[in-house]
Amino acid sequence: MAMAQHRHDLVTGAGGAQGGAVARRLLAAGHQVRGLVRTAAGRQRVPVGARPHTADLGDSAAVEAAFDTVTHAALHLPLVHDPAAAAHHVANMAAAARAAGLEQIVYSTGNRIPAAPTGIAAFETLRAAAATLLAPDLPTVVLRPPVFLDNLRAPWVTGPLLHEGVLRYPLPAAAPVAWLSHDDLAAATAAALDRPDLAGCSLDLGGPEALTGPQLARAFSDVLDRPVRYEEQDPDAFEAGLSAVLGPAATGIADTYRHAAADPALYAADPAPAHQALGIEPTPLRTWIAAQPWHAPAGAAR
């Protein structure tokens, strides 16, 4: 394991929900953290203690400068579902990682990846990125989380939950999902950054149990002490609402939920081997629910 004074970590998307959680975890471990963001607004959201660094992933020189002096990197892609643009971004990161001679890279796909190609850009850009970063000369561990629990803190989920007793989400009610929190993704990322022996591996993450929609609603009902039922949301309606926040990226996200309707096992893969390999214990669902301030909805989580 690298000593804290030797470590210099780069976290892409450090102004966002996933990257911010990773940056906070690494800072708490005493590491130097450089937070890569794309905009001046993003710099304002980088966790205190991390050093913001602005760079466009499409600018190879800027990306190489961002990786300079870095020893470890936690990477994930922005919501860019254009295959050519995503491939260019990843190629720039891979080249910069080689130039910097990184000791360890962890790439989070931000989603599970279906076993077979789907033709859905939101999945296939992630699949292609993983293949690029798993090149033999790059010390990369790929983490594939399922759906994030933090998505349930978005206003369009929390509003109906609190006011109607309805947990509405665009996943089939019968499909089991091993929901995972951003904080647990951060814990897995931090652990993987300390495991050079896992370079070349791809690990499916997840929460301690895979729950159907009604089982998820029952957990909320138990913790909040009020009736909650699950309602399967139409992905088209979900896309329409999300478009107001994310614009064109909403279509790509909605497409992944449309695919999940035909691939109900996608988010149910057993994460225990990954947890054992990394030495982590994800937060139990009911513990996570109890810790949330449900009276104050969060913003878009993914």
Image (tube, rainbow, N blue to C red):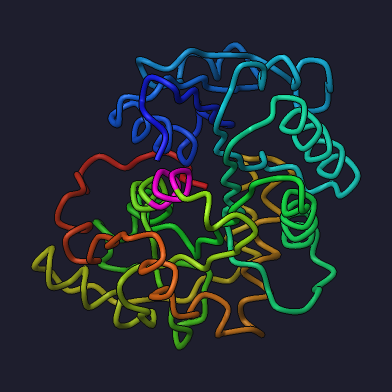
Q: Quadrant of the N terminus?
A: top left
Which SS type dominates the magenta stretch? helix
Q: Is residue 217 above or below residue 199?
A: below
Direction left: furthest residue: 225
Q: Residue at x 51, y 71 (%)?
A: 233
User: Would residue 155 be seen by someone viewing this image from the given angle?
Assistant: no
Q: State left or right for residue 100 relative to residue 29.
A: right
- Res. 76 image quadrant: top right
Query: What percent of the width, then of the height, locates residue 168?
Result: 41, 67
Query: What percent of the width, then of the height, locates residue 128?
Result: 80, 56
Direction right: furthest residue: 84
Q: Residue at x 67, y 42 (%)?
A: 77
Give, as a single range, the part of the protein colored magenta.
188-194
Q: Is residue 40 above or below residue 298?
A: above
Total numbered labels = 0
- Res. 219 image quadrant: bottom left
